[in-house]
Amino acid sequence: MQQALMDLETAFSNFFAKRAKYPRFKARKITPHSLRFPQGVTVVADRMISVPKIGHMQAIIHRPLQGIAKGATIKQDATGAWWVIFICHINLPDIQPTADRPVGIDVGLESFTTLSTGEKTAPPKFYRRSHKKLARAQRKLARAQKGSHNRAKARKRVAKIHQKISNQRADWLHKHALGMVQRFDVVCIEDLNIKGLARTKLAKSFSDAALSTFMQRLQEKAEWCGRRVVKVGRFYASSKTCHVCHSKTALKLADRMWTCPTCGTTHDRDVNAAINIVHEGIRLLAVGTTESQNAAGDGVNPAKRW
């Protein structure tokens, strides 16, 4: 009840500040089954947690808690399993960030990440790999009679397949982002309009790649490890600009390899974009510091530079 009142106060504050609409009641059948506790949820044993008003409950503690537990959320997923998510307070180590090892990352569908060093990582495509299995389970669900036990079982099978795909994607993104942060001190990446790309004819591929989630994980890992993430504007011409002579060439999306007409250098489209991104990211990083001689007190706006 305390958390419900706190949520209600936040909703009305947002409404009177004109940040949201008037709060309304949500139907229980369309909202996830969850409840939050602002305090009092603790782990009392290896397979036991203590919840206020409920008491001790058996649970599978898959890893020990770090820091001080401040609150918890108990929710039910689509497969019917219940989860307890703890909110813990952890003091991050005081690490002075450096820029000794910068890297530029160009993200896409053909290569999930292309580094300025020339390394390429193929997209995992977890949804595409499980597409046939998911389609078969969805056909069985569509043929089942509404309200029957067989339909409930078929719906649970579909939910488990979706959950496995989501878990595979999340695990891969966490590991890939952590690997980038551990290898480099400054990560420069292009700030793409993922929502706009997800409304094109390649929407399924962009949703399967989860580029926006990867950028979020990259930012989280960088803050945790004391690294820096520099986002280059989406209107910066990284692909069609030659990183040798800085001349621009009109390119099509199908042009993966191209030769600069000015200097005659042959470029890989993604590698050239990654090199330009790291150069622009380092420039933005220098402009944002007080030690830069180019923009000391000039009020440079990097977002509108181009």
Image (cartoon, helix red, strand yellow):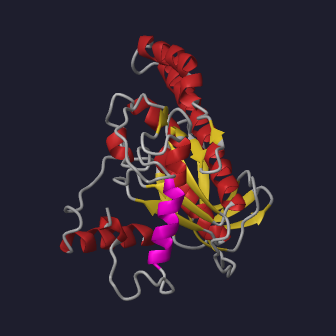
Q: Is residue 281 above or below residue 193?
A: below
Q: Is residue 204 magenta?
A: no
Q: Position of residue 194 (x, y in %)?
A: 39, 46
For the C terminus, the image quarter is bottom left
Q: Residue furthest right?
A: 46
State the residue in front, 3 or 261. 261
Depth order, front residue of 37/284: 284
Determine which quarter of the picture holds residue 64. Answer: bottom right
Left or right of 175, for residue 217:
left
Q: Which residues are magenta?
A: 276-288
Residue 24: percent from left, percent from top: 23, 57
**Residue farthest to the top?**
143
- Magenta-highlighted stretch: main secondary structure? helix
**Residue at x 37% of width, y 36% of height:** 251
Q: Is residue 110 visible?
A: yes
Q: Nearer the viewer, residue 17 or 244?
A: 244
| Residue depicted at x 72% and y 66% | 65
Q: Is 45 placed above or below 250 here?
A: below
Residue 106 horizontal/vertical position (percent): 52, 47
The vertical placement of 287 against 216, above or below, is below
Residue drawn at x 32%, y 43% as measured from the top left:
196
Q: Position of residue 225 (x, y in %)?
A: 67, 68
Relative height, residue 38 to residue 239 (above, below):
below
How many marks do you count on the picture? 0
Q: Is residue 57 left or right of residue 198?
A: right
Residue 86 seen in the current view: no
**Quadrant holding the N terminus:** bottom left
Queried whether the magenta region covers residue 286, the answer comes back as yes
34 lies left or right of 98: left
